[in-house]
Image: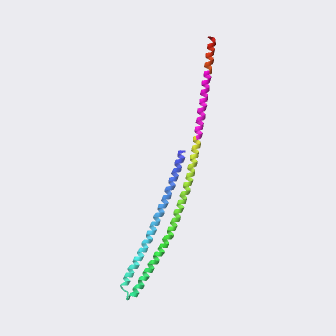
């Protein structure tokens, strides 16, 4: 019984560690991907800003500078929006993966709990059977000892009675 329970606990721990490892790997992959995308986006906007600054020194009038700045702002804004959509899609996918991992862990936990309950029932049944057998054995021994004692008492009484008749 103890070995069975230890195996159930070991399996539960192994499953929990596997789930934790999957979650850790997923978190690391997500962090690396998001960080990379954000770094690319910032780099792109900084490059556009630098080009805009260089071009600003070469413009001939204020309306040309304004148009150029609007174009840079629009392009950078579009990239930010696209990045946010990609990040949202990716995080939705991550959420779905995490949900799947947790559902798998929950199924295993339920299965492990059912196994533990069955093992507990089995152990309790075995304990009751052993106790019942021990009580029956002890009762039989007490009955036998009582019978032997009664037989000896009867024999002793008969011998005493026989001696009393002789005397």
Tell me which residue sits at (43%, 74%) in the image: 41
Residue 125, percent across and down? 59, 43
Classify 101 as above or below 120: below
Residue 6, percent across and down? 52, 48
Of the 4 image quadrants, the one containing the C terminus is: top right
Residue 157 found in image quarter: top right
Q: Nearer the viewer, residue 74 or 8?
A: 74
Position of 133 with respect to 86 (left or right) is right
Tell me which residue sits at (64%, 12%) in the image: 165
Q: In terms of secondary structure, what is the magenta stretch mainly?
A: helix
Tell me which residue sits at (61%, 28%) in the image: 144
Residue 18, percent across and down? 50, 57
Residue 12, percent across and down? 52, 53
Position of 43 with respect to 110 (left or right) is left
Taking the view exactly as shown, the residue that stands out farthest to the top is 167
Q: Which residues are magenta?
A: 128-153
Asked which colour scheme the image uses, the reply is: rainbow
Tell me which residue sits at (45%, 77%) in the image: 77
Let me know if residue 46 is in the magenta part. Answer: no
Of the 4 image quadrants, the one containing the N terminus is: top right
Let me know if residue 145 is in the magenta part. Answer: yes
Taking the view exactly as shown, the residue that stands out farthest to the bottom is 60
Position of 64 with respect to 104 (left or right) is left
Taking the view exactly as shown, the residue that stands out farthest to the left is 57
Classify 158 as above or below 93: above
The number of numbered badges drawn on the structure is 0
Classify 154 as above or below 58: above
């Amino acid at each position: 019984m103890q070995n069975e329970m230890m195996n159930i606990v070991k399996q539960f721990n192994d499953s929990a560690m596997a789930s934790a490892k999957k979650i850790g790997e997923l978190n690391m992959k997500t962090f690396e991907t998001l960080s990379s995308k954000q770094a690319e986006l910032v780099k792109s906007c900084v490059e556009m800003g630098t080009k805009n600054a260089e071009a600003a020194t070469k413009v001939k009038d204020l309306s040309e500078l304004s148009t150029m700045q609007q174009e840079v702002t629009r392009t950078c804004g579009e990239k930010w929006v696209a990045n946010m959509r990609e990040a949202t899609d990716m995080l939705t996918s991550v959420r779905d993966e995490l949900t799947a991992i947790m559902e798998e862990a929950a199924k295993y936990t339920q299965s492990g709990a059912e196994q533990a309950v069955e093992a507990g029932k089995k152990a309790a049944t075995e304990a009751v059977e052993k106790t019942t057998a021990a009580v029956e054995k002890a009762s039989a021994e007490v009955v036998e000892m009582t019978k032997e004692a009664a037989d000896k008492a009867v024999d002793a009484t008969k011998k005493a009675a026989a001696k009393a008749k002789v005397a």
